[in-house]
Image: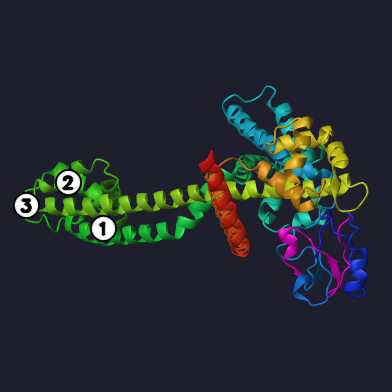
């Protein structure tokens, strides 16, 4: 499995020996389809995504080091693989800058349609033509970029056809109909022109452009089944209650024999006259909309019905509405928590893209092709303005002199050359922000260094003890062989001291 620009040499056939002969040479062209086959050996790719299909050759006895054997192949365009664009040079049309511009144009178009509703005429037709030209140009560029895949693009199929429909209706209404011989006031033409209000539906694209709005829609879709269960229970509760109240109050069965005024009879009939009217009245009570007027009209003749209204409001309004609020709040909090994961994933993607850039830069700076960067090659790469700009984009603010000084820091083994691992890991550490994990790492390093120093100190103490023991043994041995001479010399010294 390989990617264009992955920095991996084409596979070599003929077994590990043939691969080992050319493993030192690398190219930025990537592995093309047809260059590799299952069982071939390729240089070991350090990209985690591309590494999944490679089996390190260290597990195979007798295989060369630094290479991997392909165990699976996957063609581009399958599920999980990004489809290659038809015109890669138009990649900017799917970039954030272009999408933000289109979003602003859509918002401006919606504002113009609102102003045009109250203040028709004037220059609005020319403004509409300008908006339509922008939409047509954006749609044409996207179709040219994706090619035929635009109509079958997975994940964007609905929005692509939706944009095509809306822009097509706009072109039909603004450009084709005026230039044709159709009757401008015919029913079909008027109906088609009225469809231009569907341009307002373009605002729905804003939910796809902005991640926060998209997460809001995702949370609404996710909570929809739970909301339907709650609404279903509330509807069933109101439906059963409405049947009872229509008989008891609308048909006056509970008020038979009581002197109910004509005004109250008309009021009860207006609120509980039939099933649908009663359900709407209960909906007003659930929302606490003038519920006391209805309750006082009933409890004036039936005081015990106060218990009914208290229980109905306690369950229908306090319990069910609070339950709805809790469900919505829980899903919104979960969607907010997911945004943090999305930000982390985006930061990881930026970091991986930066590492890919470093891989390519390493191979480009390695002019002698030995797989190492010496100081001269590193200095030449560090003095390039494009390098400084790329590093600034990922938060590494350094001048050329400061960047050159990193060579000694990255050269851990002090060989005067940087391997690709030292090059990548060094800049990965430089890109990270200072956090608690760095302090914990330093504490761990200090403790490990302290243990190593203690071990060296113990070894030195053992050596000193052994040396002292050997020295003492030699002194004792010399003392035993020359004890007589030493005693005579001692007597001589004593005599001289006494005479003095």
Residue 115 in the image, given as x and y percentages of width and height: 59, 27
Tag 3 secondary structure: loop
Residue 202 in the image, given as x and y percentages of width and height: 64, 42
Compare residues 271 and 449 and report the one nearer the observer.
Answer: 449
Q: Which residue corresponds to the image point at 70% horizontal and 52% vertical from the top-left?
A: 161
Q: Earlier in the sequence, mark 3 or mark 1?
A: 1
Q: Residues within 10 Å of mark 3 (few under 14, many from 20)?
A: few
Q: Are marks 1 and 2 in contact (CB under 8 Å)?
A: no
Q: Residues within 10 Å of mark 1 (few under 14, many from 20)?
A: many
In the image, taking residue 366 as reference, residue 270 lies left or right, namely left
In the image, taking residue 431 as reference, residue 328 lies left or right, namely left
In the image, taking residue 111 as reference, residue 367 lies left or right, namely right
For the residues carrying marks 3 and 2, which lies nearer the camera in this image?
2
Give the residue at mark 2: 295
Give the magenta-colored segment's residue range.
29-55
For the residues carrying marks 3 and 1, which lies nearer the camera in this image?
1
User: For residue 170, which numbered disc appears in the image?
Assistant: none
Give the residue at mark 3: 258
Which quarter of the rendering shows the C terminus? top right
Distance from disc 3 to disc 1, alpha carbons, whole Å, reads 22 Å
Residue 418 in the image, given as x and y percentages of width and height: 80, 48
């Amino acid at each position: 499995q390989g990617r264009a620009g992955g920095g991996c040499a084409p596979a070599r056939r003929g077994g590990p020996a043939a691969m080992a002969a050319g493993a030192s040479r690398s190219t930025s062209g990537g592995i093309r389809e047809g260059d590799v086959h299952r069982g071939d050996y390729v240089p070991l790719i350090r990209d985690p995504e591309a590494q999944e299909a490679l089996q390190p050759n260290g597990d195979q006895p007798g295989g060369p080091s630094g290479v991997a054997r392909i165990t699976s192949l996957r063609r581009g365009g399958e599920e999980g693989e990004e489809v290659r664009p038809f015109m890669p040079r138009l990649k900017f049309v799917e970039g954030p800058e272009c999408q933000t511009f289109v979003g602003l144009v859509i918002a401006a178009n919606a504002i113009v349609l609102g102003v045009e509703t109250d203040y028709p005429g004037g220059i609005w037709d020319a403004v509409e033509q300008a908006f339509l030209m922008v939409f047509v140009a954006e749609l044409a560029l996207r179709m040219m970029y994706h090619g035929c895949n635009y109509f079958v693009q997975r994940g964007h199929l609905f929005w692509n056809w939706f944009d095509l429909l809306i822009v097509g209706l706009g072109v039909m209404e603004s450009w084709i109909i005026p230039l044709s011989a159709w009757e401008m006031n015919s029913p079909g033409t008027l109906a088609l022109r009225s469809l231009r209000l569907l341009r307002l539906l373009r605002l729905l694209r804003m939910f796809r452009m902005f991640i926060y709005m998209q997460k809001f829609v995702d949370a609404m879709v996710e909570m929809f089944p739970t909301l339907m269960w709650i609404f279903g229970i509330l509807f069933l509760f109101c439906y059963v209650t409405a049947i009872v109240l229509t008989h008891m109050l609308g048909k006056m069965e509970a008020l038979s024999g009581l002197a109910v005024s004509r005004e109250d009879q008309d009021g009860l009939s207006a609120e509980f006259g039939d099933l649908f009217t009663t359900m709407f009245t209960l909906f007003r009570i659930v929302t606490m909309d003038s519920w006391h007027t209805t309750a006082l009209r009933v409890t004036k003749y039936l005081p015990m019905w106060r218990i009914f209204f208290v229980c109905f409001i306690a369950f229908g309004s306090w319990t069910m509405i609070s339950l709805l609020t809790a469900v919505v709040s829980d899903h919104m909090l979960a969607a907010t928590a997911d945004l943090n994961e999305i930000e982390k994933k985006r930061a990881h993607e930026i970091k991986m893209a930066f590492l890919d850039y470093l891989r390519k830069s390493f191979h480009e700076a390695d002019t002698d092709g030995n797989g190492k960067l010496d100081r001269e090659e590193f200095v030449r790469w560090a003095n390039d303005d494009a390098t400084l700009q790329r590093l600034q984009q990922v938060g590494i603010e350094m001048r050329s002199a400061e960047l050159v000084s990193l060579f000694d820091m990255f050269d851990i083994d002090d060989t005067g050359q940087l391997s690709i691992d030292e090059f990548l890991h060094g800049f990965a550490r430089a890109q990270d922000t200072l956090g608690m994990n760095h302090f914990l790492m330093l504490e761990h390093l200090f403790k490990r260094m302290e243990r190593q120093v203690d071990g060296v100190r113990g070894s030195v103490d053992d050596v000193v003890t052994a040396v002292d023991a050997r020295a003492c043994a030699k002194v004792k041995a010399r003392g035993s062989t020359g004890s007589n001479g030493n005693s005579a010399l001692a007597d001589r010294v004593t005599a001289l001291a006494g005479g003095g």
